[in-house]
Image: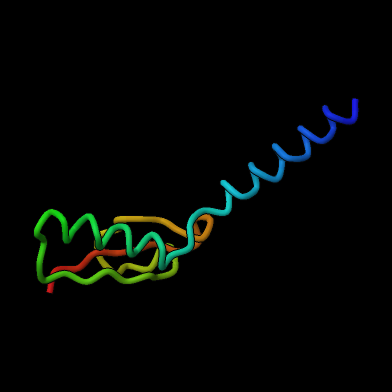
Amino acid sequence: MNKLILALGLMSLAGGALAAGKPCEELKAEIAAKLDAKGVQGYSLEVVNKGEPAGKVVGSCEGGTKEIVYRRS
């Protein structure tokens, strides 16, 4: 019985961590690495609050409260 309660507790903690999402700077670095690997040049990535009209949305972070937008320079 104690093992079952422990297992359920750990699963609930893991679910909360997944729902939190990635930190914005970590996701921004991953997206930049993918763009650089494809040879994309002359762009900028910016973290903005969700819903702000700022460019093409390429990612969502911090539990969906912020977005990463792509702009050509």
Q: Quadrant of residue 50?
A: bottom left
Q: Quadrant of residue 60?
A: bottom left
- Check the image and report above or below for 33 versus 73: above
Residue at point 44%, 69% (across, down): 49
Q: x%, y% of residue 31?
A: 28, 58
Q: x%, y% of residue 39?
A: 9, 59
- Check the image and report above or below for 39 versus 6: below
**Colour scheme in the image?**
rainbow
* Quarter of the figure with the C terminus: bottom left
The residue furthest right is 1
Residue at point 78%, 39% (across, down): 9
Residue at point 51%, 53% (across, down): 21
Q: x%, y% of residue 63?
A: 53, 56
The residue furthest top is 1
User: Looking at this view, is 28 or 53 the one in front?
Assistant: 28
Q: How many marks?
A: 0
